[in-house]
Image: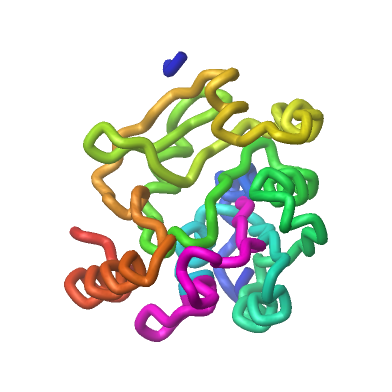
Amino acid sequence: MRASILDGPEPDPVAEQVEGVVLAAGLSSRSARYKMALPLGDKSVIERCVEGMVDTVSRIWVVVGWQAEQIQRLLARYDKVETILNTRFREGMFSSVKAGIARVRAPRFYLVPGDHPVIGPHVYARMLGAAGDIVIPTFEGKKGHPVLFRSHLIPEILAQPDGTTLRDYIASKGYVTVQVEDEGILLDIDTLEDYDAIRERICAFGRDGVES
């Protein structure tokens, strides 16, 4: 059914109500290179993913596994970011989902794969205005990322049996959608061809890769 930076500004009370979970533990088996560290302009893929949400949240949990130390080095300068090592990452993405959301303490949290580097900050801000336990953005009728959850669902998600996928869980609970004007919610890096397309997008639309 669908239905922190030193000496910076005062904390945003809205941001204090939401955290982010980024899934970055996978093997990058389809891209032939380690995609989280691939350069996009002056930053890596994982840095761009984190920066899309950093102003909207109080904390970002990045779940790492394969190449964990490399991601930790890339993200060391971000005060809001903490990494979580998922030793079971070879068991699939849902193991990383569980490892990440178990740390969340805010009333809501975003969940996004780390290979989505061109989601604009306005997407995260717009989603916060939607009511619903699970909120999914859409672009031209297609669902994308991130997904925004109410944290009271965490115990239920953690209790899901092996073999469950996040898609299965969301379908069983129902969700609401929010239309956004940002194709970046659909753009991930599965292959090197995907990577080349996103690099071209950043060249065309600027450092954020977002069409204005």
Q: Please provide percent x and percent y for residue 194.
A: 33, 65
Q: Say above or below: 195 vs 180.
A: below
Q: Is residue 193 left or right of residue 99?
A: left
Q: Nearer the viewer, residue 163 or 77?
A: 163
> Can the viewer see residue 197?
yes
Q: Nearer the viewer, residue 177 or 26?
A: 26
Q: Please provide percent x and percent y for residue 101.
A: 72, 45
Q: Please provide percent x and percent y for residue 135.
A: 48, 31
Residue 62 in magenta stretch:
no
Residue at (62% x, 35% y) in the render: 165
Q: Is residue 97 left or right of residue 15?
A: right
Q: Please provide percent x and percent y for residue 64.
A: 70, 65
Residue at (76% x, 29% y) in the render: 160
> Can the viewer see residue 47?
no
> Which residues are drawn in magenta?
20-44
Residue at (53% x, 72% y) in the render: 36
Q: Nearer the viewer, residue 109 or 101?
A: 101
Q: Quadrant of residue 153?
A: top right
Q: Is residue 99 left or right of residue 39?
A: right
Residue at (35% x, 55% y) in the render: 187
